[in-house]
Amino acid sequence: MTALWIAVICLLGAAVGLMAWLAYYRLIRRWAMRLIRERLQPELEERLGGEKPLRAEYGANFFGLESAGKGQLRGNGILVLTPRELYFLQAVTEREVRIPLRDITAVSTARSHLGKWIGRPLLRVDYRAEGGADAAAWAVLDAKGWAEALEAAAASLKQKGGGGDDR
């Protein structure tokens, strides 16, 4: 065999291997998201108190709270936008993050958060917390769409007069 044929065979093998890995990754991700949805959906409905989501993403990857520093572990869960708040429930730890829309000071997309990145835009939310300013970020499938939906929901809440209860 010539060196050219060996190179062609190696490239074909690498391409087939990459396609198999991508298919496997998609199947595993789909399976994991289904498990997250099945496991957390009843809990989510209870915690939201019947409030209807405007937008939800199962499998959002939480990058942490700025106030908690770099030592936090990322984790998948459900990110939900309601008419009053942005709510996240982490799958494994059942950690909960609640950000009232009236406390949001900025919404943007970011390349990284707390020194962590994944090569695509993150949804970043800056807000007023009890201890001062804070920020959180998530990897979602459509960070720009989430940012637009958050801004629209916050503007709608302001038009209605601020938002009411804290939950």
Image (cartoon, helix red, strand yellow):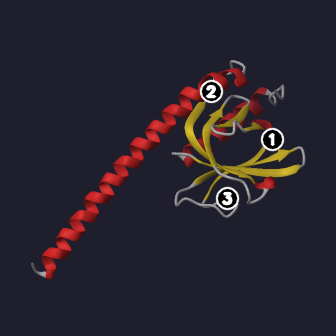
- Binning the other alpha carbons within 10 Å of mark 1 as few (below 14), some (14 to 19) or many (20 upward) gives some
- Binning the other alpha carbons within 10 Å of mark 3 as few (below 14), some (14 to 19) or many (20 upward) gives many
The amino acid at mark 1 is: Asp
Drawn side of residue 59 relative to residue 154, left or right: left
Measure the C-alpha gap from mark 1 to mark 3: 20 Å
The amino acid at mark 3 is: His
Measure the C-alpha gap from mark 2 to mark 3: 26 Å
Q: Earlier in the sequence, mark 1 or mark 2?
A: 2
**Residue visible at 68% across and 37% down in the picture:** 88
Q: Which numbered tag is attached to residue 113?
A: 3
Rendered image quadrant of residue 40: top right
**Residue visible at 72% across and 20% down in the picture:** 49
Q: Earlier in the sequence, mark 1 or mark 3?
A: 1
Q: Earlier in the sequence, mark 2 or mark 3?
A: 2
Drawn side of residue 13 relative to residue 71, left or right: left
> Foreground residue, 144 or 7?
7
Rendered image quadrant of residue 17: bottom left
Q: Position of residue 14 (x, y in %)?
A: 28, 64
Drawn side of residue 97 relative to residue 15, left or right: right
Q: Which residue is mark 2?
A: 53
Q: Position of residue 74 (x, y in %)?
A: 64, 51
In the image, is residue 122 above or below residue 34? below
Measure the C-alpha gap from mark 1 to mark 2: 18 Å
Q: Which residue is mark 1?
A: 103
Q: Nearer the viewer, mark 1 or mark 2?
A: 2
Rendered image quadrant of residue 44: top right
> Foreground residue, 51 or 42?
42
Which element is circle 2 on? loop
